[in-house]
Structure formats: C-alpha cells, structure tokens
Amino acid sequence: MILRNAGRCQAVLGALTIFMAQVASSAQDDDLRRVEATSPLAGRLAAVGRVHAGHGAGLSMATGFLVSTCHVLTAGHVLAKQGTHVQVGSEARFFPSGTALRVNGRVVAASQDFVMAVAPSGFDQQRIPNDWALIELDQPVSGIEPIHLLYPGASTASDTVYTVVGYPLGQVQQGLYAQEQCRNWSTAHGGLSLKGVLIADCAVRSGMSGGPVLLDDGAQMIAAGIVVERFTIGQKIMAIGVPVAAFAEQVEAAMRDSDICAAGAPFAWPIPSTR
C-alpha cells in the first residue's frame, strides 16, 4: 500500500470493525444457499454465470453476469495478472447459468487505474472502485434476459436489502449460490465517506468475485454493483462491492460501440415500494 493512504485505510478498517462489533447478527458462511433449479430465484438469475480467464496453472475462475445479450460484467482482478492492470483485448470465457454453453469473448473496457497487487493489503478505498471489467462476447446469448444496472442517479436507502449471487469455489455441491435479505451499509461512518464502495452484510466466498449485488423492486432484479472482496471481523462477514456509478459511463460507452449486439442503455430505475 502507498504510505500516504495507510492512515486512511486503517481509519476505514477501524470504523468497519467498530460497526461490525456492534451488530449482533451478521452474515455467516452458512447463510449462502445453493440456488436449486426448482427455486423461484433460479429463473431470475439466468444471466449470472461463470467467467474463466487464462489456462492451466494460470486459470482464474469467478462469476460474471450479462448486462446485454453480448456483454458480461465482472471484477477486474478476475482478469488481471499480478502487477498489471486488466488488458483490454484479453480473452475470457463465459458459461451462462444452467446451460451447457461456453461463449468466448474479450475485454472491451476496464479501469486502467486498477493494478492487481501481488499481496493486496486488505480494504483499500482507492483500489475498490476501479476493480471492474466488461467483456464483449463473440456472439449474443439468446433466451436469457440480461440484468439491468441501477441508474447512476438513483440513490439507495439505508434500509435497502440486497441479494448476492455467485459461484463459490470448493463447495461439495457446486453451482450457483445466493444470500437474500442482506443489509445495506454503504453510508458515511465515523466521519469517513465511503463513496465509491458498496458494503453489505452478505456472506461471500472465493469464486463469487464479479457477481452482482442485486436489489429487488418486485418487478425485476437490478444490479447495484459488483462483488469484489470479502471483509471479515471474527466470524462476521461483509461483502465489498463496486457501485454501478463508479463505472457506468465507461460501460455504457463500450456497449454503445458494440458491433456484436445492439445494446441500448443498460440502466433501470427501481420501482418505489408500496409497502
């Protein structure tokens, strides 16, 4: 970590530690549940799939999700090699959920301010907002409804609940896992602004990086961000994500310039609750 950021990082870590110590019930690993084919949730998550990059000993496996019929969002660190940023034009493969499809693609947008650290130092408020990448597939995926992104101008209330989805590694029963009803904690805390960082008390594991952090307005699931890290204090777990606003402009521009599929604006406003 750059020394000038060390004090700020420690302050953020301290704030998170105090917060989690005050939360009686927080996410645990066993809060994740396998999404069975018969589950009502399964039909709403068809756009989530596995992302593979590299080969052999250099193979990286994680999660991604369709935001158009030919574009997949994922975390930047899934595609970057140590000591470098994500290479635009590098190859990746996407395996849509519940299908035998494998679709090849290439990276068309990624933050060049993100560098894959050899030994990441934990919660880094400067790195997190840049940890994203957009893959353009070689051909559109038909029959699957893409997930809309939260409109950058939309705000999320403090009582917003999320669903996290992904493909955790090392499970006895492999497949898509989810945790519903995670609480939002993406607000200023302890005098520090957490702008550019999404935090929720969701259980996430290795392999779920690149998966969506979803909010459900009843009519549709909308991605508020991308899972990039797991933060733990004792047995309590927080999901750390990149909010859509951090990459919305670059992603929309890349999708608009696509020669593979006619991709319109990928955003949606959540329908206000009538509760």
Image: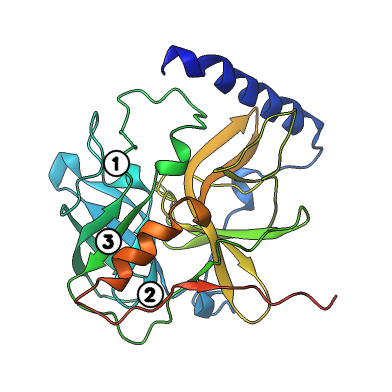
Task: Using residue 259 as the reference point, say whether residue 263 is left or right of it.
Answer: right
Q: Name the residue type under label 3.
A: Ile
Q: Crowding at label 1, few (<14), some or many (≥20) Cα neighbours within 10 Å?
A: some
Would you name the residue on which mark 2 appears?
98
Q: Position of residue 231 (x, y in %)?
A: 56, 34
In the rendered image, the vertical position of residue 16 relative to residue 71, given as above or below: above
Residue found farthest to the right: 275
Q: What element does badge 1 sit on? A: loop
The residue at 67%/59% (across/down) is 155
In the depicted view, which residue is nearer to us: 248 or 32? 248
Alpha carbons under labels 1 and 3: distance apart: 15 Å
Q: Position of residue 272 (x, y in %)?
A: 74, 75
Q: Quadrant of residue 259?
A: bottom left
Residue found farthest to the bottom: 143
Q: Which mark is residue 135?
A: 3
Would you name the residue on which mark 1 appears?
112
Q: Quadrant of residue 3?
A: top left
The residue at 54%/43% (across/down) is 196
The tag earlier along the polypeptide, 2 or 3, is 2
Q: Name the residue type under label 2.
A: Gly
Q: Nearer the viewer, mark 1 or mark 3?
A: 1
Alpha carbons under labels 2 and 3: distance apart: 20 Å
